[in-house]
Image (cartoon, helix red, strand yellow):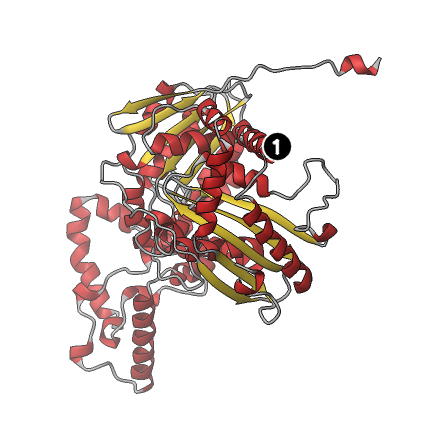
Amino acid sequence: MLSTTRASVRIARRSFATVVDNAGLKVASIESNQPTVSVTVLAKAGPRYQSKPGVAHALKNFAFKGTGERSALGTIRESELYGGVLSTTLTREHLALTAEFLRGDEQFFIDVLSSVISSTNYTRHEYEELVLPAMESDISALLADPASHAVELAHALAFRSGLGASLFAGPHSPVTAHDVQQFASSAFAKDNIAILGTGLSESSLKSLATSASSASGLTTSVSSYFGGETRVESHGGLQTIFIGFGSAGAPSSELAALAAYLDPNPSVKWARSESPLLQSGKTSARVVYLPYSDAALVGLLIQGSSTEQVTTAGKAAITALKGSTALKADDLKSAIAKAKFRLANTADTREGLINIVGSNVLSGSSGVSLESSLSSLDKITATAFNKAATTLIKGKPTFVAIGDTTKLPFADELGL
Amino acid sequence: MAGSALGISLAPYIRSSPTLTKIFTPIANWYAGGALYRQYGLLYDDLLIEERPEVQKALSRLTPRQAYDRAFRIKRASQADVLHAPLPKEQWTKPEQDIRYLLPHVIDVEAEIKERAHWDTLAVTRRK
């Protein structure tokens, strides 16, 4: 009776957040019944807000280095003894410093995070000996991966400044340790950060709140969408093209549904899809849907070893993009279901949940719930979807080609 | 008394006592003047024995300007030594210029090595 052992085990999972505005500082604690807990300091300090190109990337790598309380080595060794994980994540808008650890160790890890945001030394020798090599390896990893490189270039074309700034410093960045220190002082200011805890009470997060400086936060300009075309010669990697469109303004749920509709990959693992985008397995295609606080980028990234197949798949991608302006009701229904599942699935992981709650908290909206985003997806009508798709595709396309540029197509050759 | 790769030094002990400081400061100043390195345009930290990993690491942490100036002083002193004559008096190091630009870095590096040894040999006890 094997089947009985697989009786449905449903764990009731409730995730909700309480947000408290603590004298200008936002503290949110998210209920979670996981055995480990986490604390994240989310700062509006992505490259979008940076004062000098590459300084956000440097700040990301400067996290958990020597502070007034303990050295870089001490931080690593001591957190290893506690068995926790310290990590940093940089997105175009936010820098997240996260500590994940066992329940009961919050005192140490909160102390680590508060010393990082308040008393990191930003010494020149640590910058040169520890931070720069880490940045260089990030940059070489980027250049070795045409997919991420294409998305980086697409942002520069699509948004130019602000969101267009690269996540990575250039290979010969003019940033100094002093620049990083100055950037950090406003990046970790009270009105620029939010503190998010999962599985922790607010009162234990409050001690972190007091360590934030009271300097003024960082500012940025409102994003606008431009679009354009670029081609980069590269050898060894896959032939890569990115075809995308962007929109300024808060991303609508129609765009999330559109991204779900465009995805050619089958929902069943190892299944073969007949989509012309995949050229029966000879090319890979994935949807790039990147919503930001005041803009969004939707596109298809196609990779393959031969330029001919990538070109054919690229033509199919444009047909798919143009086809989305007159979508059938059935297709819309499945696209919405797919988008809802994806959103819910992202919120299932701690990182995804923190991203969703964190960006809501930082933008100052109080109604933090997954349900509202899910129900807004439910409310999409065919006319609203088609209208959103038409406006998106009417804009100037963003086209990036990386690989053998003598053979890869130009945007107009694909019919853009 | 502080022992380190820099050698044994009584200076911290002397500095901790006002009386001893008063007695020894003139003697120290006379000795530094008499050691003649200032007449060759050097600073005291140019004389630190550099064939040691700690000092090599410390040298790598100098600013480009400090590293350039150090190389210049050492070259100029070597040339003066070849000529068997101190530099002209206006090129002598003035006592107020004789700052310990390398020592803080060496102390930092030593502290780092000591800390690493501490963490490497740490005995962990379970929390009660």
Above or below, A165 relative to A198: below
Query: Residue at coordinates 33% horizontally, 60% vertically from top-left?
Result: B102
The location of residue A337, given as percent across then percent down, is 58, 29
Task: Give coordinates of residue A2: x percent, y percent.
Answer: 82, 16
Q: Residue at x 27, y 71 (%)?
A: B42
Furthest residue toward right: A1
Q: How many marks?
A: 1
Reading the image, the residue beneath label 1 is A330
Q: Which amino acid does label 1 sit on?
A: Asp
x, y percent for residue A322: 55, 49
Say if A61 sits above or below A382 in the image: below
Q: Which residue lies furthest to the bottom in this view?
A: B83
Q: Position of residue A157 (x, y in %)?
A: 43, 58
Q: In this view, does A90 lie above or below A395?
A: above
Left or right placement of residue A219 versus residue A290 in this view: left
Is residue A324 visible from the viewing direction of this image? yes
Q: Nearer the viewer, residue A10 or A216?
A: A10
Q: Which of A196 and A223 is in front in this view?
A: A223
Dot 1 crowding, Cα within 10 Å, few <14, some 14–19, many 20+: few
**Residue at 29% of width from left, 32% of height from top?**
A211
Dividing the picture into quadrants, the one containing residue B45 is bottom left
Provide the chain ID for the residue under circle 1: A
Label 1's element? helix
Task: Locate residue B25: give its quadrant.
Answer: bottom left
Q: Is residue A9 left or right of residue A130?
A: right
Q: Can residue B7 be seen in this view?
A: no
**Residue sitting nearer the eye, A184 or B93:** A184
